[in-house]
Each structure stands twice: as structure tokens, then as C-alpha cells.
Amino acid sequence: MKYIFLVLVFLLSACNDADVASRNLSKAADNFEVNRRIVFYNGITNDYMLVIEGLCSKDNSSTEHTLGIVCKVGPNSYKKHLLGLSDNVTFFIEQIDGKNVSAYHYRVIFKPSTLIPDIEIR
């Protein structure tokens, strides 16, 4: 048991402040705590094609040619956007507001409600 603890201490001490802050910012964004602006840009026409702003997170189902964005639009209301990417269409995600996160402490979020599945009987 103490060897596991020593390994964890070593791994955690190997991270720099920027890595810890970056992970904590990502966790905050994935929990819809960060305002973001997502812009889709056409490299041939030099035009913005689409702009999404709000409490948004990059969806984990994104692929090389598809980007999924999930935005919180109300207390229990969400919208999901799926956008196609090509060789001339790219995107960038900008954090609009600053967010206070620690560079010294990892943020762990435990949600017991996610362990119990929603069962729908039809």
C-alpha cells in the first residue's frame, strides 16, 4: 500500500503548475462552469462560418472529421451540436472569462448520480 502512495506522490510531483491549472480548467469547462466561444473558420474564404458562445464543452464523441459541442442552456437543459470539419474548415475554442483554479491542488469531482443509470421502460 505504501508503494502505491509513493508512486502517486512521485507522479503528482512531476507535474508543473501549468499542467495542474490546465487540467482543472478543463474539468471546470466539462462541468459547464466556463464561458467559451467556439468559432468555425473557412480557410479559403477567410470567413467565420459559425460562432457558438456559452457554457460549452467539447464532446468526447468528436472525431477527426466531426466536432461535437455540448452547451448548457438552462438548469437541466442542454444542446448538442455536431459540426463537420474538412481540409479548409477549422475551429478554435476560446475561453471568454477567467476562472479561478488552483495550480497546486487537483480537482476531483465525484457524482454518485452517474453511477445509477436512468432506466426507461417502453
Image: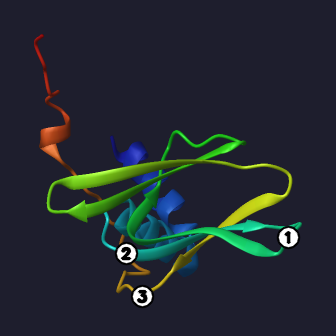
Q: CA distance from mark 1 to mark 3?
A: 29 Å
In the image, 117: left or right of 85?
left
Q: Which mark is residue 121?
A: none
For disc 1, the marked residue is: 45
Q: Position of residue 52 (x, y in %)?
A: 49, 68
The mark closer to the camera, 2 or 1, is: 1
For disc 3, the marked residue is: 97
Mark 3 vs mark 2: which is more N-terminal? 2
Q: Position of residue 58 (x, y in %)?
A: 50, 55
Q: Residue at x 45, y 65 (%)?
A: 26
For disc 2, the marked residue is: 34
Camera-side residue of 6 and 20: 20
The way the protein has been coloured in the rendering is rainbow
Mark 2 vs mark 1: which is more N-terminal? 2
Q: Position of residue 65 (x, y in %)?
A: 71, 42
In the image, 87: left or right of 119?
right
Q: Are marks 3 and 2 in contact (CB under 8 Å)?
A: yes
Camera-side residue of 104 and 24: 24
Q: Residue at x 21, y 54 (%)?
A: 77
Label 3 sits on what residue type? Answer: Asp
User: What secondary structure is found at the residue carrying circle 1?
Assistant: loop
User: What secondary structure is found at the residue carrying circle 2?
Assistant: loop
Would you place residue 14 above or below residue 6 in this image? below
Furthest-right residue in this view: 44
Q: Position of residue 45 (x, y in %)?
A: 85, 70
Label 2 sits on what residue type? Answer: Val
Mark 1 vs mark 3: which is more N-terminal? 1
Label 1 sits on what residue type? Answer: Thr
